[in-house]
Image: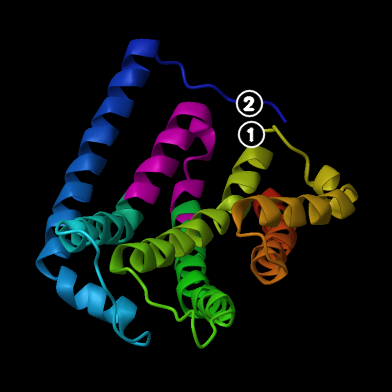
Amino acid sequence: MRTALKKITIIEHLQELRTRIIKTAAVFIFACVIAFLKVDVIVKFITKDFGKFIFTHPSELFLTYIKVSVYTGFFISLPFIIYQLWSFLFDAIEPSKKRYIFYFTILSLLLALIGMLFGSIIVFPILTKFFTSFATDKIIPLFSIENFVTFFLTTTLLFIIVFQLPIFFIFFEKIGLINIFLLEKNRKYAILVAFIVGAILTPPDVVSQILLAVPLIFLYELTIIFSKIFSKKPAG
């Protein structure tokens, strides 16, 4: 597949990128401010099912609130960020396929939402229960608010990112960098890589590795399905 390049200068390309970054940063900062105004509610929601917490440094709770506000601001502004990303990529690399911006944006948001829910509602409680199961009568779980919230946010963010993989694979297929038939042919290697990635990105236990590897394999199959759908040429 031949890649269509937009005939603009490097300067124009960088100016467009700068404009999009400025707009995205403005929306992100605004979202962070909104999140900070309700940060106590957000923290209560995250910690509601896990008892009491401690903080071991005078500034720890405040810095935790800042971290929660930043992550939440990112989640809130994610639709705008995703739209700007795909608009820029298609406009710069594949202007003839700009009609795909809407579909890619919607699909990215849907997968991001699924990843967020999967990471926060399914994976995080399982991992927390698994790790705390090693507690004994003399060694009890006493969570620092900063460590607990960071674990929750990073787990959620990790699955949001992971669930975006099919979209980027489809994009690479559209511009001719990968071949859908090659993906099908190398399925067994993809499964192996999924478990290797699960071992690298998660703590050293089988449960968390499987919880990441299985969605990766599912997303790989989803990539093949979506690639075939988007590869179909419109009638006429």
Q: Position of residue 218 (x, y in %)?
A: 71, 65
Q: Amino acid at mark 2?
A: Thr
Q: Residues within 10 Å of mark 2 (few under 14, many from 20)?
A: few
User: The N terminus is located in which quarter?
Assistant: top right
For the residue pair 124 and 114, the one nearer the viewer reads as 124
45 on left or right of 34: right
Q: Position of residue 164 (x, y in %)?
A: 54, 54
Mark 2 vs 1: CB contact within 8 A:
yes
Vertical placement of residue 173 versus 95, above or below: below
Q: Position of residue 52 (x, y in %)?
A: 29, 83
Q: Which mark is residue 175?
A: 1
Q: Amino acid at mark 1?
A: Ile
Q: Is residue 213 visible?
A: yes
Magenta segment includes 60: no
* SS at mark 2 in the image: loop
124 on left or right of 66: right
Q: Earlier in the sequence, mark 2 or mark 1?
A: 2
Which contiguous range is marked in magenta?
81-103
User: Residue visible at 41% across and 67% down?
Assistant: 152
